[in-house]
Every structure is written in structure tokens, then in C-alpha cells.
Image (tube, grey):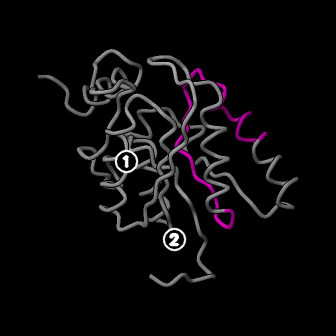
Amino acid sequence: MARDSRVPQATVLLSGGIDSAAVLALLKSQGMQVRCLFVDYGQPAAEQELVASSSIASHFLAPWSSVSISGLKVPENQEIKGRNDLLIAVATSCNPDAVIALGTHAGTPYVDCSITHHHAWQDLYDVQYSGVQRLLTPFIERAKPEVFALARELSVPISLTYSCEASGGPCGVCVSCRDRSALDDVSNPRV
């Protein structure tokens, strides 16, 4: 597909989960040219996430690539400090001419999912790229159920997504599995 320089370019950090898939669907629905990037930084669920990420990108006919980073100590079932910093930096290095889009949302306890974190990165971009580069976090003020509802509205193929922090999941106990279970319960109420 030829690139149209008049259409905004975006690189979506596509983990394979619902949030990043919804970002992809949203940006595509807004007419942006979107590329997807999966980053394997040694997370326990990297293999499952990579398959989900690639499948979702294919579903939306979006160019997809992956980057592997080795040598990091990644704790299992714990917060990975600086994870979004790493992802944003890698995406910026891979696609410096594109808006970088991330599926962070409200309601998480992690600092790197906060509005403050978003503003700090945008301030850094403004210094380094003279105000030309942008970090896009369209769900930063939306709670997970709102993101899930939008994903359904945008016809995100939920069955292709993967939401578990453990290898060989879904484990049913990690934060991502609990979120997914709660969302499934909301969308499929028991009678």
C-alpha cells in the first residue's frame, strides 16, 4: 500500500490484548494509516501475545512487525517497572515519523499508565522532536469497561485477543485474566 503523506501515520503498540486492539480499530476508523508493532521483551506470555498481535493486525489489514529485546529481567505476575517507557522508546526508534499509540486506560495502579506519565513523555517528545512527535493514548481517561464497550462497537475480534500475564495461560488469576473475566461477565450476564 502506498503511503499518502497527507494522512496521519500511527504506530500502534499492539500487545495482542483488547486495549491495544481497540486502539488499532479506533485509529483505523478515524482514517489514519496504521502500522502495528509487537515488542517481545521477555514477558512470560510473549509467544501467545505475538500470535494474537499478528492475527489482530491481519484482521485489520494493518502492516505488522515485531522487535525482540533480550537480557531483561522480567518478573512473573508482577508489575514490570518501566515497561511502557521501554515500549514507547522502541516504537519511536522503529518509526520516528509516526504518532505512537498506546492502549493505556484509566483505573490501573501503574504509574506508566497515568496521565502524568503521558504528559511527561509528550514533554520529552516536544524537547527532542521540536513539538512534531506525539504520543497518543486515547483511553487514558476511560475505564476498562468503557474500552471493552468501544472494542465491541468497533467490531474488534475479541476471540483473537490474548489477555494473560503468565506463560501457557490463561491462568485465571493474574490481573489481566481477572479483568477479562469481569468483562466477559458484563457482556454475557448469567440469567
Name which residue type carries label 2.
Answer: Gln
Taking the magenta stretch, the answer to whether it contains residue 138 is no
Residue furthest to the left:
191
Q: Label 2 belongs to which residue?
A: 33
Q: Could you tell me which secondary element the residue under label 1 belongs to?
A: helix
Q: Which comes before the other along the chain, label 1 or label 2?
A: 2
Q: Are marks 1 and 2 in contact (CB under 8 Å)?
A: no
Residue furthest to the front:
71
The answer to whether 2 is drawn above or below residue 153 in the figure is below
Q: Could you tell me which secondary element the residue under label 2 belongs to?
A: strand
- Quarter that holds the N terminus: bottom left
**Left or right for 32, reference 112:** left
* Residue at 44%, 17% in the rendered image: 77
Name which residue type carries label 1.
Answer: Ala
Q: Residue 159 location, x and y as percent?
A: 23, 44
Q: Residue 187 location, x and y as percent?
A: 25, 34
Kindly report the distance in space between the C-alpha atoms of the residues bearing marks 1 and 2.
Answer: 19 Å
* Residue at 37%, 47% in the rendered image: 151
- Quarter that holds the C terminus: top left
Q: Which mark is residue 86?
A: none
Where on the picture, by quarter, is residue 93?
bottom right
Nearer the observer: mark 1 or 2; the answer is 2
- Chain part drawn in magenta: 96-120
Q: Residue 169 location, x and y as percent?
A: 27, 26
Foreground pick, 107 / 67: 67
Q: Label 1 belongs to which residue?
A: 151
* Residue at 61%, 37% in the rendered image: 84
Query: Circle 1: is it few (<14), some (14-19), or many (20+) Cα within 10 Å?
Result: many
**Left or right for 8, reference 181:** right
